[in-house]
Image: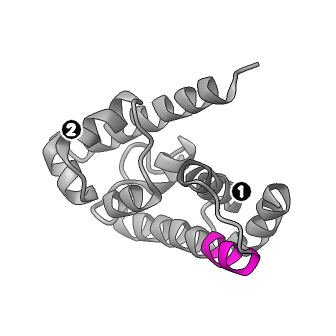
């Protein structure tokens, strides 16, 4: 059984590996990816090494420049597209992430309970995975996830 700290390191390394894979797929330097994500290059390097966990806004900014949100969140790519994906699918993935963020933010305001950033990001990732890349499933998935958090 992993401790909370070990689990966080384990998860951050997977996220880091996926960020690097997406950056390389998009043929970007670390500096270009950092610029798109609105962070310093040094911080981007920490994300890729698993030394830090990117915030939801970092991932969202990166996705607006072509990164595959579904892959970043779940580690899975659509079977039919392999390692590249059409623009309309990438936009759809961003919509799922955006809806997940909105649902969690609304819950925090409604309940006056605020998750630490790493738990918020984890909840967003879980929500996106449960919604299976379908915006219409985000609300249902949010209800399940938030019952577990509450």
Describe the element under mark 2 as helix, strand or loop: helix
Give me the C-alpha separation between circle 1 and circle 2: 32 Å
Describe the element under mark 1 as helix, strand or loop: helix
In the rendered structure, which segment of residues is drawn in magenta?
Answer: 103-111
The reply to whether the magenta stretch includes residue 73 is no
Q: Nearer the viewer, residue 97 or 102?
A: 102
The reply to whether the magenta stretch includes residue 108 is yes
Q: Nearer the viewer, residue 13 or 85?
A: 13
Note whether residue 122 is visible.
Answer: yes
Query: Where's residue 104, x and y in %?
Result: 64, 69
Mark 1 lies on residue: 130
The reply, left or right, for residue 26 in relation to residue 79 is left
Examine the rendered structure and indicate whether residue 4 appears above or below residue 63. Answer: above
Q: Main secondary structure of the magenta part?
A: helix
Query: Where's residue 24, x and y in %?
Result: 25, 38
The reply, left or right, for residue 64 in relation to residue 93 is left
Note whether residue 24 is visible.
Answer: no
- The quarter holding residue 30 reads top left
Of marks 1 and 2, the one in the foreground? 2
Query: Where's residue 114, x and y in %?
Result: 65, 64
Cβ–Cβ under 8 Å for marks 1 and 2: no
Residue 42 numbered mark, or none: 2
Dot 1 alpha-carbon crowd within 10 angstroms: few under 14, some 14 to 19, many 20 or more: some
- The quarter holding residue 63 reads bottom left
Identity of the residue drawn at 83% across and 61% down:
150
């Amino acid at each position: 059984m992993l401790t909370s700290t070990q689990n966080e390191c384990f998860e951050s390394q997977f996220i880091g590996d996926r960020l690097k894979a997406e950056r390389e797929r998009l043929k970007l330097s670390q500096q270009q990816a950092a610029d798109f994500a609105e962070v310093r290059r040094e911080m981007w390097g920490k994300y890729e090494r698993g030394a830090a966990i990117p915030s939801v806004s970092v991932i969202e900014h990166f996705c607006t420049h072509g990164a595959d949100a579904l892959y970043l969140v779940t580690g899975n790519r659509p079977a039919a597209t392999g390692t590249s994906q059409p623009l309309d699918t990438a936009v759809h993935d961003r919509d799922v992430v955006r809806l997940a963020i909105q649902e969690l933010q609304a819950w925090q305001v409604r309940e006056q309970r605020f998750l630490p950033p790493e738990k918020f990001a984890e909840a967003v990732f879980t929500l996106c995975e449960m919604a299976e890349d379908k915006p219409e499933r985000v609300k249902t998935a949010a209800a399940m996830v938030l019952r577990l958090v509450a």
